Image (cartoon, helix red, strand yellow):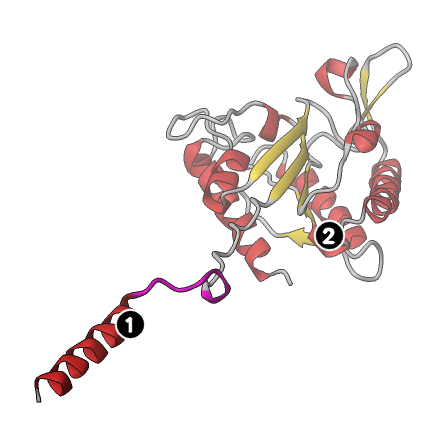
Amino acid sequence: MLRALALSVAALLTSTLALAAPASADDTVPTPAPAAAPTITVVGDSITSWFRDEPGSVSQGWWSMLAREMGASVTTLAEGGSGMNVRGNNCHGTTFGQRLGALQKVDYLIIQGGRNDMYTCTSKGVKKSLPQLQRKKGIASYLSRLGRRVDALGIPRERVLVMSPWGKADRRRGYQIQSYLRLYSNRKHEGFTYVETKTLPNSLTLDGKHPNRAGSTYLSDTVRRVIASLP
């Protein structure tokens, strides 16, 4: 009887130890590696270049807000006064087209522009107005070159976002420029994703052109919703 009891106790201990033993290496469930942060490049004008990556400040840019909301890494290639037809920095800088070579493969490429594309620069570095037809041709030409560049980099065209935010200043020409960008971005032409933005009221701008913090928040939220809808 005592021997039977001892065997029972030994069996119980063996069973308990077996249950408590740690899993072998073969049974361990691997921990998934954290997803890489999305990468974003923004090509833009002063609506991008005026602002900084300063969370919570009035100087925080729409692109900074977007990147932080998405947990993304962002690079800006932006100059005040620049566009698809005109060099920035008072005609001493570059056009959007002259920055094509600086592009690298990213998850999302955002083209923010159009605000200065009523103009071009003369050979003497003086800004002058462009006729309507030349504005349109210049925009179409840039977007065509951009398409070839992103194809070479392996960026899906639907992940190229084109946006042209305007305040109330010079809004009539703004509608015209936006119509060109919308047209040449669509599936029948370049196959980019056009981001519709409403006219920024004075309450969302600093000067009728550039967004204040509330305006930057609106732009960031608008772009983020579009990105979330992409495949």
Side of 15 where 103 appears, left or right: right
Q: Which image quarter: residue 110?
A: top right
Which dot, 1 or 2, sits closer to the camera? 1
- Residue 121 horizontal/vertical position (percent): 84, 20
| Residue behind mark 2 | 182
Q: Which amino acid does label 2 sit on?
A: Arg
Instruction: Specify the farthest residue to the left.
Output: 2
Q: How crowded is mark 2: few (under 14 residues within 10 Å), some or many (20 or more)?
A: some
| Residue behind mark 1 | 19
Q: Mark yes or no: residue 118 visible.
A: no
Q: Does the magenta stretch include residue 26?
A: yes
- Residue 230 horizontal/vertical position (percent): 63, 60
- Please give the name of the residue rendered at 51% of the width and 31% of the height, measured from the top-left corner: 61
Quadrant of the rendering where the C terminus is positioned: bottom right
The kind of secondary structure element at disc 2 is helix
Side of 142 where 17 appears, left or right: left
Q: Residues within 10 Å of mark 1 (few under 14, many from 20)?
A: few
- Please give the name of the residue rendered at 47% of the width and 38% of the height, measured from the top-left corner: 65
The kind of secondary structure element at disc 1 is helix
Quadrant of the rendering where the N terminus is positioned: bottom left
Nearer the observer, 165 or 146: 146
Instruction: Note whether 163 is above or below 210 in the view shown.
Output: below
Q: Distance between the residues labelled 1 and 2?
A: 65 Å
- Residue 62 horizontal/vertical position (percent): 51, 36
Q: Does the magenta stretch include residue 173?
A: no
Nearer the observer, 96 or 31: 31
Q: What residue type is labelled 1?
A: Leu
Q: Give the range drawn in magenta.
A: 21-27
- Residue 97 horizontal/vertical position (percent): 83, 32
Q: Which image quarter: residue 99?
A: top right
- Please give the name of the residue rendered at 58% of the width and 32% of the height, measured from the top-left corner: 169
The answer to which of marks 1 and 2 sits earlier in the sequence is 1
